[in-house]
Image: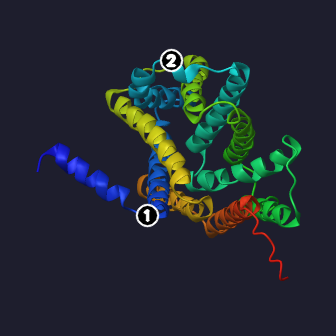
Amino acid sequence: MSIRRRLAFLTLRWARVPPTLRGILYMSASTVGFAVMHTLIRYVSAELHPFQIAFFRNFFGILIFIPMLMRYGLAPFKTNRLPLHTLRGALNIVAMLAFFTALSIAPIARVTALSFSAPIFAAVLSVIILGERFRLHRWGAILLGFSGTLVILRPGIIPMDLGSILVLSSAFLWSITMIVIKVLSRTDSAITITSYMNVMLAFFAFIPALWVWRTPSYETWGWLVVIGLAGTLAQLALTQALKEGETTVVLPFDFLKLIWVSLFGFWLFGEVADSWTWIGAAIIIASAFYMAHREKMANRPKVPASPLV
């Protein structure tokens, strides 16, 4: 069987897979990609500054979008909301720099677990910025999510480390970015939003990278390419997962990310995630899952009441 016929056969088989299962598989694949990226960032940070790693992550990530630009030209960059795209890029790069720095100085399992708090912050900000209304059960889920963060941090029991502060700051900034994306999606397509994100992140990351620039070794060049490709492919897989399957079904599988980074952290760095990290992460994921479930229920069309009632 030729390669072309084999690819056509596999494509046909994949199309027959139920959408929900495809969403689960895409989400699972994204967790592997993000775990690989997080681990390699920690590994490469022994040679390069996190700011420089952030630049190469975005620079090599753009390479995946070159075929799209060759097909569509500059059409994806047509927008009337350039200032908002710029704001999104600026917030995103600060969040990324903080997160990459946290990965370089703190256990990767702890950093990953705390990063799950971003949707919790976004839920609160959607009330403040977008004026969305939450009922008591949604606020209960938010409080549950923040309690999971406290379980991981245990303030007053163990000292608050710089890595935890940075990743929480990153999660908060990323939550603001989520709100900006939500506003942009009202007028701009996903392709336009993604195109501006990649270009602006590479541009904004280049400026701080210059301050700490150091020529990578030949081996590190290879790892930087993998970081860029793994991060971009993971992001695409995550987007496709949310498109293929229901959020309430695929979201819990994001917890696999913590399993992979824990295994990689133990294997490469001898790090062992404590039970509090696992418990706190599980609480945060559970609260995010519940909010996604309530969001689904709120958006479900109401069934007309029976005239016999």
Give neighbour class at mark 1: few <14, some 14-19, many 20+ (Cα, 10 Å): few
Q: Which of marks 1 and 2 is nearer the N terminus?
A: 1
- Quarter of the image with the C terminus in it: bottom right
Is disc 1 placed on a helix, strand or loop? Answer: loop
Across and down, in percent, residue 119 comes to 71, 51
Residue type at mark 1: give it: Pro
Q: Going by the image, does 8 lie left or right of 176?
A: left
Check if mark 1's residue and mark 2's residue have beta carbons within 8 Å.
no
Of residues 275 and 113, the one nearer the viewer is 113
Is disc 2 placed on a helix, strand or loop? Answer: loop
User: Which image quarter: residue 50?
Assistant: top right
Which residue is the extreme one toward the front?
A: 307
Q: In this view, does 263 lie above or below 102?
A: below
Which residue is the extreme one toward the left?
A: 1
Across and down, in percent, residue 290 comes to 71, 66
Of residues 228 and 247, the one nearer the viewer is 247
- The dot on residue 118 is none
Across and down, in percent, residue 36 comes to 44, 48
Across and down, in percent, residue 239 comes to 54, 46
Q: In this view, does 19 lie above or below 167?
A: below
Distance CA(mark 1)–CA(mark 2): 35 Å
Residue type at mark 2: give it: Leu
Q: Mark 1 points at which residue?
A: 18
Q: Name the residue under label 2.
A: 74
Residue drawn at (75%, 69%) of the image: 303
Residue drawn at (72%, 46%) of the image: 168
